[in-house]
Amino acid sequence: MKYSVKKANATNVRKISEEFSLDMLSATIAERRNFSDKESLKFLLEGDLVYQNSPFLFYDMDSAVERIKAAIEDGEKIFIFGDRDTDGITSTAILYKELKRAGAVDIVCRLPLNDEPYGLTSDMVSEIIDSQATLLITVDNGISAIEEIKILRSVSIDTIVLDHHLAGEEYPPATALIDPKVPGSGYPFSGLAGCAVAFKTAYALRFSSSPLYQSELIFFHAKPGIDSVKMSAVKMVNFILEDSVTEELSLNMVSSSESRMIAFLNQGLPIIVMDKDLEQKALENAFTDSIEITFNDVRRDIESVIPSARNKSLFTLSNISRAVRYSDIEDKELAVLISLFRSTAIYKDKSLNEGLDEILALTAIGTVADLMPLRGENMLLVKAGLKIIQKNPAPYLLSLLSHLELLGKQITSKDISYYLAPLINASGRMGRPDVALSLFLAEDKSEIERLSKELIKMNKERKSSTEETLLKVKDEAENSLSFYLNRFILVENEIPRGLTGSIASRLLNENGKPSLVLAKTDDDRISASLRSKGNFNSREFLESFSHLFQDFGGHSYAAGFSMAKENLDKFKAELADKIFSLSDCEDEEEEIEVDAELPESYMGRDIWKIRDLFEPYGMDNECLKFHIKRAEIKEILPNRNNGKYLRCSILYNNEIWPAVYWAYDSSKTYVEKGSMVELIFSPEVNTYRGISRMQMNIIELENVT
């Protein structure tokens, strides 16, 4: 059994534990997983949207919002163009719902159907022009549509690009370009999915109707000492820090005309404080002359929305506030004032919250389905969305969950990956993504049920087509594996375009080798999907051939590309050279990185609480893994449905824990009642027939003497 435990910095672990009130094991895991800075810990530990990044950090967000508002006010036709996968479908639904909520009356939604290629094409440009739309908004695409957007611009059709793919050397001439991967976008997190970019735009559009939109505010706090006054102030626009000043003065030693603080406050802007009489007195004590500063005391507003702040000073609040520990503002009392004011503004404004749950749930689904990294802000968005799916799902989600027999179960990111996402993706793979989109936009119960059943049917057809295609390519896959020295699989035998991802995943699962599936489209293009695992990075691998591609992208374990058919022979030649040059390291036993060695005294129900702390799991944030040196197989349980896996119970720390080992191979490792084993496991919650229980999901297991 090959495994490793990343060395943890003891000083960092203690700091995380003390500052963020975490037990030492949780703090150690956080440090090992690089959740060690304030920003990462904020998104790990918090689940309230008040902690999200401001959408106006995108430099072009103001331009996008103003153009959309103008289109709505003037009754313009707005054309939304998305993509056929789950991310593209949810992105389109989010934007459509938000535009309707904002008052748009003439909206066209369009996704690529049947074998139509991804992204804006000349045919799609013609369709947009013929529609007489005056504003195009692309979602989950558009960053590479330079010539197409130039044509639209030449006929007075503005374009707003909402995308998350990598840009080339040239950007499209869009009215606004919202893409976190564009250098200089201004946004601090590049890992957003297309649906999250749409969500950010929707939230910005909501905020633009708030009285605080574009308002310049100054937040001020004076802290009196024994013989001095320390004053801090920040200037913010859309809750984004623009400027700040700090000044400490001895009592009654200088005039106000000599003060940087007074100059900063005298900008004719609202000055927000809590307890203005105290602030006024502290300010007056600092100077030799009288001053006239008008403060806006927000205590009453804050207490009306946040009762826990009632009758507490900023000093007291700063010692109990969770938000303060994530702030970069040195004056923690000023930081808590800003946090309280922001929370009050958000919770008080109904327009910011009504209907937000629905698009947030779609954001969670699209983010997980598109294999986005579940780190940073994605953790917050998915966490919040999962909570909504669990407690208050929209009618169409309720219908899907019912058909998938997930009602009453704690919905996790794994449930999205294994059940919801494949169901939604099926419509795109079968060339009918409009079915899933229609379901997300439907309001009539009977229509929702009809579309849900159609989606279920399409998924069954997709599975059937996948099985038929797998039989067709079986010999080709075996020959390919032999040709590539048991390192790689390439198949191209009449694969339907929509099934490349499914076929690649199945070939990977069945053979354990990176699998590339090519499909030829009607427009002389090759569309392809690559799936891998372990140390083989799909996206980095494809980057070696990017000079041959029209477009490519993806992640560590899932990537794809499109390519002109004329480049196929050259690609296959270069692919062979690349594969033959690889070492055989992939054939070695993969080393498993575990989060902690687990002594007996640590094994308890709190392990499952720690598991919950690091949810949601997915790309770049795999399930926790713990190593146990020696435990006893207490009981071997019968398999359900004669499945080839091991169900057993493990005796450890004087408790018996139910366990399952899906990869069990009795020919390699045989265990029986009483066997002593070394194992690596993930703590999971298994729900069966409405009953949930803690369970050890065994990753690796070996006999020990």
Image (cartoon, rainbow, N blue to C red):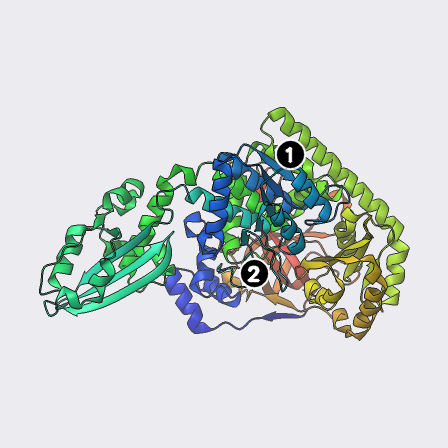
Identify the mark at residue 182; answer none if there is no mark.
2
SS for tag 2? loop
Residue 318 in picture, x, y percent from top left: 28, 57
Q: Between residues 314 and 123, which one lies in front from this camera angle?
A: 123
Percent coordinates x, y for residue 617 in the rendering: 57, 54
Observer-nearest residue: 291 or 675? 291
686 sits to left or right of 63: right
Residue 356 is at least partly visible in this image: yes
Q: Residue 454's quadrant in the figure?
A: top right
Q: Residue at x 36, y 55 (%)?
A: 323
The front one of 604 and 704 is 604
**Quarter in which the N terminus is drawn:** bottom right
User: Taking 88 as reference, is 258 left or right?
Assistant: left
Classify mark 1: residues with Cα within 10 Å, few (<14), some (14-19) or many (20+).
Answer: some
484 is higher (above) or lower (below) than 643: below
Amino acid under label 1? Answer: Ser
Residue at left offset 81%, top offset 41% = 464
The numbered dot on residue 438 is 1
Is residue 414 visible from the viewing direction of this image?
Answer: no
Q: In this view, does 441 lie above or below 228?
A: above
| Residue 118 shown left or right of residue 492 in the figure | left
Classify 372 as above or below 349: below
Determine the secondary structure under disc 1.
Answer: helix
Q: Earlier in the sequence, mark 1 or mark 2?
A: 2
Marks 1/2: CA–CA distance: 31 Å
Q: Is residue 348 above or below residue 43?
A: above
Callout 2 amino acid: Val
x and y percent of residue 221 in the render? 23, 58
